[in-house]
Amino acid sequence: MPDRLDSSTYRRLVREALAEDVGPGDVTTAAIVPADVRLSAAIVSNATCVIAGVDVAREAFALVDPAIEFIDLCSDGSICQPGDRVATVSGPAAGILTAERTALNFLQHLSGIATRAREFVEAAGGRLKVLDTRKTIPGLRALAKYAVVCGGGVNHRVGLYDGILIKDNHIAVAGGVAEAVRRVRATGTLLPIEVEASTLDEVDAALASGVDVVMLDNMDDETVRAAVREVDGRARVELSGGMTVDRVRRLAAAGADYVSIGAITHSAPAVDLSLCVIDG
Amino acid sequence: MPDRLDSSTYRRLVREALAEDVGPGDVTTAAIVPADVRLSAAIVSNATCVIAGVDVAREAFALVDPAIEFIDLCSDGSICQPGDRVATVSGPAAGILTAERTALNFLQHLSGIATRAREFVEAAGGRLKVLDTRKTIPGLRALAKYAVVCGGGVNHRVGLYDGILIKDNHIAVAGGVAEAVRRVRATGTLLPIEVEASTLDEVDAALASGVDVVMLDNMDDETVRAAVREVDGRARVELSGGMTVDRVRRLAAAGADYVSIGAITHSAPAVDLSLCVIDG
Amino acid sequence: MPDRLDSSTYRRLVREALAEDVGPGDVTTAAIVPADVRLSAAIVSNATCVIAGVDVAREAFALVDPAIEFIDLCSDGSICQPGDRVATVSGPAAGILTAERTALNFLQHLSGIATRAREFVEAAGGRLKVLDTRKTIPGLRALAKYAVVCGGGVNHRVGLYDGILIKDNHIAVAGGVAEAVRRVRATGTLLPIEVEASTLDEVDAALASGVDVVMLDNMDDETVRAAVREVDGRARVELSGGMTVDRVRRLAAAGADYVSIGAITHSAPAVDLSLCVIDG
Amino acid sequence: MPDRLDSSTYRRLVREALAEDVGPGDVTTAAIVPADVRLSAAIVSNATCVIAGVDVAREAFALVDPAIEFIDLCSDGSICQPGDRVATVSGPAAGILTAERTALNFLQHLSGIATRAREFVEAAGGRLKVLDTRKTIPGLRALAKYAVVCGGGVNHRVGLYDGILIKDNHIAVAGGVAEAVRRVRATGTLLPIEVEASTLDEVDAALASGVDVVMLDNMDDETVRAAVREVDGRARVELSGGMTVDRVRRLAAAGADYVSIGAITHSAPAVDLSLCVIDG
Amino acid sequence: MPDRLDSSTYRRLVREALAEDVGPGDVTTAAIVPADVRLSAAIVSNATCVIAGVDVAREAFALVDPAIEFIDLCSDGSICQPGDRVATVSGPAAGILTAERTALNFLQHLSGIATRAREFVEAAGGRLKVLDTRKTIPGLRALAKYAVVCGGGVNHRVGLYDGILIKDNHIAVAGGVAEAVRRVRATGTLLPIEVEASTLDEVDAALASGVDVVMLDNMDDETVRAAVREVDGRARVELSGGMTVDRVRRLAAAGADYVSIGAITHSAPAVDLSLCVIDG
Amino acid sequence: MPDRLDSSTYRRLVREALAEDVGPGDVTTAAIVPADVRLSAAIVSNATCVIAGVDVAREAFALVDPAIEFIDLCSDGSICQPGDRVATVSGPAAGILTAERTALNFLQHLSGIATRAREFVEAAGGRLKVLDTRKTIPGLRALAKYAVVCGGGVNHRVGLYDGILIKDNHIAVAGGVAEAVRRVRATGTLLPIEVEASTLDEVDAALASGVDVVMLDNMDDETVRAAVREVDGRARVELSGGMTVDRVRRLAAAGADYVSIGAITHSAPAVDLSLCVIDG
């Protein structure tokens, strides 16, 4: 699990999230909570989950009031059980109440992704690396990809710029896999070349072009197994399309290297977390 | 359903989403697709869903290349069946392929929220207004709240600034509902005052303070019904906490005015959409 | 008077104000004042005024040089007499001289608003709440609204998003008050509904629609009194349009709840403040 | 009067002003005004004034909805009488109503500055150039300085970077005018050197150092006249401090070159403008 | 040579460059050039060079005044001789004169990089691909890398995120090449792995770890040749460190794949270009 | 040499430079370097140079990890010999390696400008002030102008806003020097007026208009000497156009005041600097 998340990745996001939530001011808290009232509270998990984003939550409190002390009790990547405390916050009550929702919104979303990633990682049983995709919720990709790693997954290319992935539409434009790969090679790029294939013929074409990775896209189980045999170590193999936890478990031993799953980032339900006041 | 979504709400978000996806450049497309190749494609729904965010998708293509023509075939709030075309795009192939993922990422996420909202709205059967909450994915609140309206829901306060919601922690700090409400009134605010209550005693305290809305938080069905009888029209009533579609259906006729559901925005699965090239 | 002003409200504004004043550099100070010269100075009021914006002034010095020590001697909302010290600054002379004008520009403008607000609040004698409007100097609304509170006023809606105010043009488009209110109600909004009325008939129409607040716009004193009698507690009443200090004093006891005055924010003269070096 | 105002000066400001006013949306207009309703209206002056900022107002409407047609009937720097139309807008009613306040807030503030500048320019009767100062409302300096020119005034340095102005505190740090000027000269700067003087001795010291401009700061009328005689054309002379329209009229023929007045920009009351629907 | 440069890459940069040059206004042009004066001028090359950045120059004129017509006569990547016209501009004279310097500053810098790149590409004679490095002038990397391609070069990784390059300090921390490569492999990354080697032993260690690319760093010619023989096709080879045009020519046939040169981007002299008014 | 560089000048630039280099993350360092490994290293000069930008380099390390200790051993404006240490950094190895390139990119570029400036300053031998121009690399003007001062040069106007420079195209539009100067004077500006002249007749015309500075543009040596005699102290004289170090040495005693050289900022080669790990 990653040992750091760079604050420059999330500081602007937290600032914008606070801006959209607090706007011109937390009118309820401003009216009710005097500046000198202090509070201690814990972020508590109400479910079994993998935590991700503790430092992002910390930042939300710190940006609202640097006087709030935030102590993390779980680190990113660790597993919480219902009732476990993820962190405690103590300090000016007003700031804690104002920052609460923004902190939790980040933490529950990122932990949701980490938790989902881990389900797939466990299904893969170490025999397939679990990759994310570019199907992320807009604006949060860096955090989402970090959360995937917290859940034990591996990051596929971050965007369109750090990996070559030749998809069906590229192949159609080029008039074939061979020509598409040739055009990429002609740029002299140092990046690895991956090609999407949905039939065994396309797998053969990709192999003939000497690509680094073949993505088996939306194949049924039987075709997947045939394709892996066909590749026979001449390229790395990525499974993609319609992957459920059950199917990953079933295909884990098929001999592929990677499985990529969009749902980890685009459809992970939020983890149920809450902020509970700690008595005296 | 809303008849417009202001572009200033989403232009910056689309620009940032493109920046995180395209970064220094779509290396695959730049290598393979010449500038003069043109393409026509359709965004197709692979599920029954409520569409939201068509103009956001349009913006993604327009920002990448203003020469791309985007024709919407569904309007926000309309229902699509599997196989339905949501929109068509035609123009320079390179720009279409570069913008595709960003456009779909917005559209599948917002349509997911609208679809989820509508499930609850249908369960409520017109007897309860379905509200969203502030439990939104950070950075996307304005769009998420718009998607809720596309699904037939109603927006609760947008943030901490456009509504008074006195929660348990505020009450604890103030030393009681009466004092909390008094402090809010003392500011002279024109905003309506809502108080969270989790017991019948708290409902009574709220009513005694003359609040505008009482939120029945995490009560069981029986207590909800008792609380509604207790309120007896002296305030509007909002149900909140652990609301599922089934429970909303069950409580629809209980006499409350609103039900608020965080999961609509924090846990809506993405709708399955894809971009398909149109032949000829 | 408010007990805090969130730094996120003004940090960007102070940074931009410094940017527009200092630009590529304070050429005079850079040439004349060595880095090791220190200075002590006081911000002195040359008029009777209500102070607002002390922390904004502090920020201007802090952003130019964190080594400058700023000690506030007046808090926002307090009244200064000519010759009173508002704050002292001590530290590197260069930074103090560079930041001086920006700090004073904020402080003199915000204190001007607070001072103007207080004149109206005193005229209202506690019988009318004094509201600001959206007629603020662009870019400074949050600070202007804060200054109004420092002067004892109350904030009307911050913008177009946190309150419903149905004005004559809305009514004209809808074809009448009743239809306009109906359309707003149909959105399910939780916000209070205010309607502008300039005749007694319009007041009646607003009351018939059950609005929360009636704004009596540009009525003469006699009509105001008649309208208040007509409303008779069925809605809150706001006076608006052409309000001078004298007129507010005259109408204070007319039975209305609020008076709103654009001039507090759009035409408040700056308070005369200066930075005076402290000997020895 | 200036024949253009660069849009890059104000586009960001208008965008931010709209953001602070419209925020997540104009809830009243969204509820009441259908997208297909159109409106024609005029911006009407309710006072005698010098207009400034027509293009800024145009931008506010254009940013909200590019379909709004804005026709200016007055140009910046021209004089309007009560009842005169400054501009007309026509197009989608919703956008016009949403943009109205932001457009007017800019126009009434800038026209206020231009109007105030012109009062001083008329008092100076062409014998003194009327300068603005750096005492501007934060964030709006470029627009404020433009408005001063619309009123017939002349811009003093824009900020600390485009002019040398040696003030009393600089002189104190340097240990005298001569040394302060020497230090500035040593930088090799091409900028003109102005020195603040509040006594005749200080005027002499400035002249002895060969400065380009002497600022007579807070002198009484008699001392001003003596100082001008003393300078006797060896430098340009600027009057500053406590300048009212009457005093400028009185000192216009004293032989100075410039008079600078902070109140033009920091205390100009807004001009009364309104948006009136045009029938038929 | 690249057939497009995405405007989103440079629009912000051009806007900021204009802001730093024009600031509060081009005072000379505003004073002298009336708004209705028109001008036609040509951007002329005073040297033999490879052009890069034509669209960036176009943007500078367009941002200052969209009414300026810019016609490119050379495309990026083409070679100009002294006296050749790169582009013509015609339209409002004021805008042309204001934008001139910013447009030329971009064009002369980027063309300088392209010209320098081409010198190396010609020296390499098609036997080595000429790579850029991360040694770029801050803020301009995307444009600099584009200019390299215009000159016939190939882009090495854009930043620290789109390629693995294990340098001496990484190896020292890991305790050896083998362990460093193992740690990278353990992340599951799809990116190619490059290792820096400055001795033949280090080359062997890199090969033993199965890396994709070996960078021969600061080796003398003889060692380079020995290292290439040692690699013998088991990895791609990049030459780096102290590469001059002469040395690239000498090593072109040594059997390596790439040569990377920091000076192309960090020390390319500007191409001499000027804007000349076109008569009649 | 300047005794300070304001951090607000460079903080945003460093942040953007880090963003373009680090992007979504330094994948090599993240994989190899554990968070608890520490490193000490020195920035070493490999050439004789004038250092500029030490605080900018410091900022790069500080933004990546505030725990990195940066100790400067040379101050801006001082001269380094090959092997001299400019600064040391010690702290978390990961952050040091991630920030290294960005820090060096700034330092090597700015020191390159300072070094180039000093060559010209030495050639001028104190008899001519060496000015920079507006021919700077876009986005870095403030830093570039600072580096010029570090090298002993003097800053010409920063942009189009802080100096009047009437060039040939302005004169052509106005129809002559006299009219161009008259138009500038009519604005009442306090800025000095400089006119470009390329013949002795133009010098005469400029003098007749009483300008403050005459720029002798692209004249040969003989004409320069004649022009200086012609001016005879009636204006300051700036030499410009095609100035090499040799020519500056030759013309140093010609009697002009300034020489301006674009190449100092647009074509200064980077100084060779490297980061070397310090043993034990």
Image (tube, coloured by chain):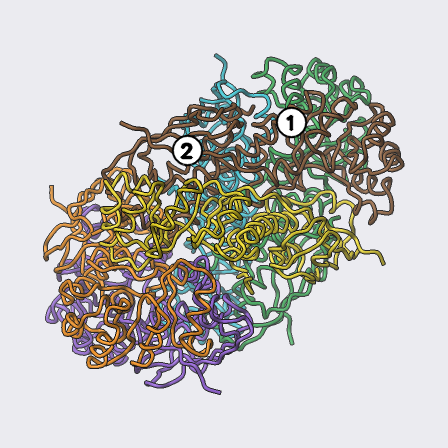
Chain colours: A brown, B yellow, C orange, D purple, E green, F cyan
Vertical position of residue D31 compared to residue E185: above or below:
below
Residue B273 visible, this orientation = yes
Question: Do badges 1 and 2 share one subunit?
Answer: no
Q: Left or right of B252: which side holds A179?
A: right
Residue F271, percent from left and from top: 54, 34
Return the residue nearer the eye: E271 or C116.
C116
Marked residue chain, label 1: E
Whether tag 1 and tag 2 are in contact, CB under 8 A, the answer is no
Q: Quadrant of residue C120?
A: bottom left
What's the residue type where badge 2 is placed?
Answer: Arg
The residue singled out by tag 2 in the image is A58
SS class of the residue under badge 1? strand
Q: Which mark is residue E165?
A: 1
Residue A240, percent from left and from top: 74, 35
Residue C278, percent from left and from top: 13, 46
Residue E38, percent from left and from top: 57, 75
Q: Which mark is residue C243?
A: none
Return the residue nearer the eye: D75 or F239.
D75
Q: Quadrant of residue B236?
A: bottom left
SS class of the residue under badge 2? helix
